[in-house]
Image (cartoon, helix red, strand yellow):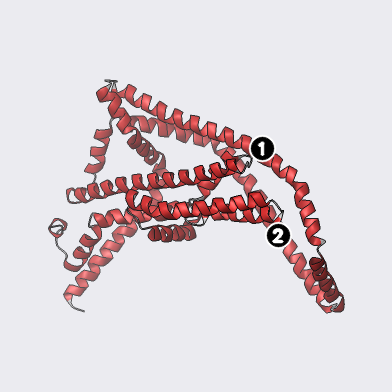
Amino acid sequence: MDKVMTKRILRGLWVCVAFVSLGFAIYWLLPLLYPFVIAWLIAYLIHPLVTFLHLRIKFPKWLAVTFSIFVTFGGAILIFSAAVTRIVKELIGLSQTFDLHTETWRDFFTSWTDNAHIQSIISEINKFYTDNPNYQNAINNNISKTTQTVGTAVTDFVTGFFNVVLGFISALPSMGTILVIILLATFFLSKNWDQHNSTLIGLFPSRVRQPIREIWSDLKKAFHGYIRAQLILISITAVIVMTGLLILQVPSAFTIGLMIGLVDLLPYLGVGIVLVPWAIYTLLIGDMVLGIGLSILYLVILIVRQIMEPKVLASSVGLDPLATLIGMFVGLKLFGVLGLLIGPVSLIIIGAFNGANVFRDLRNYIVGGGDYDDLRK
C-alpha cells in the first residue's frame, strides 16, 4: 500500500473517531445537561420579545426577561389547561356514548351470529371437532395457549399503564425541581444572551466558527419551516375533521378532531387509521349516513393533504415529501413513535451540514489533507 493511500486511511479513521467521540459525548452529557439545553431553547424563543421590551419600551433587562418568561409559561399553561379541560369534558361524553352503544353492539353481534351462513360454518366446525377426536387435544392446547397469550398481553398492558401513571406521580417532585432549574437557567441565559453566546462560540476553534454559523443559520430556517409546515398541515386536518363531524352531528367533535389532527403526523396513513375503520363499522351497523359521511370526509382530507403537503413542505422546509416519508419510517423503526420526529429532524440536520459544505470539506481533508482553511477556498 503506497504512502498516499495510507495517509488517506488514517485521516478517514481520524474523522470516524472524532464523530464517534462526539456522539458518545452527546449521549453521556445530554442526560446531565438537558435542563440547560431546554433553557437555552426557551431563551432563544423569547429573545425577540426580550429585545423588543428592552430596546423599544425601555424595560430594564431583568424586568423584560421576567415578563417574557411569565408571558411564555403563563400562556402555555393557560392554553394547555383549557385544552385538557375541554378534552376531559368531551372524553366523559365519549365514554357515555360508548355505554349507550353497548346494547347496539351486542344486538349486532347476536344478529351476526344468528345468520344462517355463520350458523352453517359453526355447524361444520362442530362436526369436524366431533369426527376428529384426535385433534381435540391439539385444538384445546392451542386455544389455551392463545387465551394465555392474550391474557398475558392484557395484563402486561394494564400493568405497564399503571406503572407509567405511578412513575409520573412519583416523578412530580423531581419534575418540579427540574422546572425550577429550567426557569432560573432561562432567566440567566436570557439576561446575558449575547455574552453567553459569545462564550459558547469562543469554545470552538476560529477555523470552524464560520461553518458553525452557516449550519446554525440553515438549521434555524429549516426547523422554523418544519414546525410551521407541521402546524399548518395538522391545523388543516383538524379543522376539516371538526367541521365534517359537526356537520354529521357527531358528539365530541373537538376532541376527535384534535386527536385525528395529531395522528395525522403519520404521513398519508394517519387519518385513515381512524376514519377508515370507523366508517366501516358504522356501515356494518347500518348507520349509512354517518358511514358515507366519514368516507367522504376521509377522501376530502386525503385530497387536501395530497395537494397541500408537497407545497407546504417545499416552501417551508425544502424537504422532498418522499424523503420526509422515508425519514419518518426509518425513525419509527429505529426509535419508535419518537422517531416520527427524529427522522425528519435528522434530514434537516444533514441538509444543513451539506449546505455548509461540511461533507465536501471532510472528503477533501481525507483525500488531500492540508489545513482546513485552505480546503474551503
Mark 1 lies on a secondary structure that is helix
The reply to whether residue 241 is in sight is: yes
Q: Which of the 4 quarters of the picture holds residue 197?
A: top left
Q: Residue at x 19, y 63 (%)?
A: 365
Q: Which of the 4 quarters of the picture holds residue 245?
A: top right
Q: Tag count in the figure? A: 2
Q: Which of the 4 quarters of the picture holds residue 122?
A: bottom right
- Location of mark 1 (residue): 92
Q: Residue at x 19, y 68 (%)?
A: 367
Whole-angstrom CA distance, mark 1 to mark 2, is 28 Å
Residue type at numbered disc 1: Ile
In the displayed structure, 358 sits above or below 216; it is below
In the picture provided, is 360 more to the left or to the right than 115? left
In the displayed structure, 353 sits above or below 127; it is above
Between 342 and 204, the residue placed more toward the observer is 342
Mark earlier in primary sequence (1, 2): 1
Residue 357: image x %, image y %? Answer: 22, 57
Between 165 and 18, the residue placed more toward the observer is 165
Residue 372: image x %, image y %? Answer: 16, 57
Q: Nearer the viewer, mark 1 or mark 2?
A: 1
Q: Residue at x 20, y 70 (%)?
A: 7
Residue 139: image x %, image y %? Answer: 78, 72
Residue type at numbered disc 2: Val
Q: Residue at x 66, y 37 (%)?
A: 92
Quadrant of the frame with the N terminus = bottom left
- Location of mark 2 (residue): 150
The reply to whether residue 167 is in sight is: no
Residue 315: image x %, image y %? Answer: 33, 50
